[in-house]
Amino acid sequence: MTHPPRLEVVGLAGLPDVRPGDDLAELLVAPLRAAGVREGDVVVVTSKVVAKAEGRVRRGVDRDFVIDEEARDVVAEWWGPAGRTVVARTRHGFVLAAAGVDASNTEPGTLVLLPEDPDASARALRRALLLRLGLHRLGVLLTDTMGRAWREGLVDLAVGCAGLAALDDLRGTTDAYGHRLGATVVAVADEVAAASELVRPKAAGVPAALVRGLDAYVGEGDGPGAAALVRAAASDRFGLGAREAVRAALRAYGSGRPAVPPAPDAAEQAAAAVRAALPGVVVEVVGDLVRVVGSDARAAEARVLLRVALAGEGLPPYR
């Protein structure tokens, strides 16, 4: 596709605090008309606002319990002074802190979850906006904030998409020097989501934006949605955090969820990992010493697993 020479990104102010059951499309009509919405524009809305309208709000419940409900697999997990921190893969395939369960920008005591099906939500919102605005081509993006492996900082990325090409596959084309491109697939939806965040500061109460200049990427159909951005598990070379990969190899964390709770200290945690990996093996902890009891082949295997477990947990080499 031809890349646009110019983009406009406008924050849509004036939306009220959205509550379960609200008609989000109707609430967006006035701000969009004020911004001069027209054919080929893209409307970007935070997934949190959509989730609130759809009633994906939980009150008076334990956050860890809700995270475990929403998580399909735990990618990384650790405990610190603030308690448990989880990075998890959701049922949609997104890898998010706390499985997308969020307590920010919502009433105290409430948690907002991701929409049940963000692409379906984006399609429904697009259809409603097209009808109310009398348009034929309009893109709709739902975004959520994510961290990125190997990079500091957070950025909004697309979790729901309709009417906009989520990807621009440039494989097979040539660059300015005539080199054939073999791996370049541009995440258009993510780029638009991130750009829109610049006019939607977290504390400004502006959950939506209008992006203009992407006509080449906006069609009359819904398109494949943000699901096209999710890398298949079979081709994901970084599907687990470093420690979680070790734990999975030790069979201590079969599905990515911990088989044992965190132990009170390093020695107990190492012993717990080995016990979970090889049930029945006797592992003793005396002070700061971890010892596998026995001299048979199974005990020898346990000693090897103990060294691997210690390395995976970043613990000193107990014997």
Image (cartoon, grey):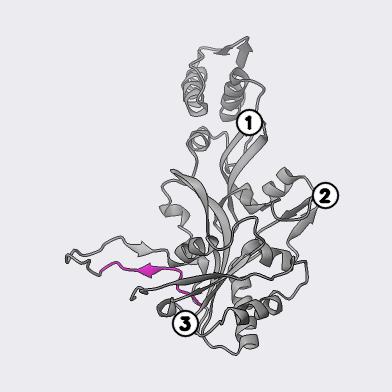
- Is residue 236 left or right of 181 when viewed as pictured? right
Q: Which residue is mark 3?
A: 219
Q: What residue is shown at x 51% (from left), y 66% (from top)?
A: 226
Q: Is residue 31 visible?
A: yes
Of the two numbered discs 3 and 2 on the same chain, state the one appearing first in sequence. Answer: 2
Tell me the residue that label 1 is attached to.
80
Which segment did they paint magenta? 163-172
Residue 266 highlighted magenta (yes or no): no
Is 168 colored magenta in this rendering? yes
Cα separation, mark 2 vs mark 1, equals: 24 Å
How crowded pointer 1 is (Cα within 10 Å; few <14, some 14-19, many 20+) is rated as few
Of the residues shown, which amino acid type is indicated by label 2? Gly
Where's residue 215, x and y in %?
43, 80
**Distance of label 1 from label 3 (alpha carbons):** 47 Å
Amino acid marked by disc 3? Gly
Amino acid at pointer 1 = Gly
Helix, strand or loop for disc 1: strand
- What residue did someone put label 2 on? 60
Residue 175 bears which disc, if any? none
Count numbered badges in the picture: 3
The picture places residue 182, in percent across and down from the top left corner, at: 26, 62
Pointer 1 or 3: first along the chain? 1
Element marked by disc 3: loop
What residue lies at 41% left-to-right and 53% top-to-bottom? Answer: 235
First in residue order: circle 2 vs circle 1: 2
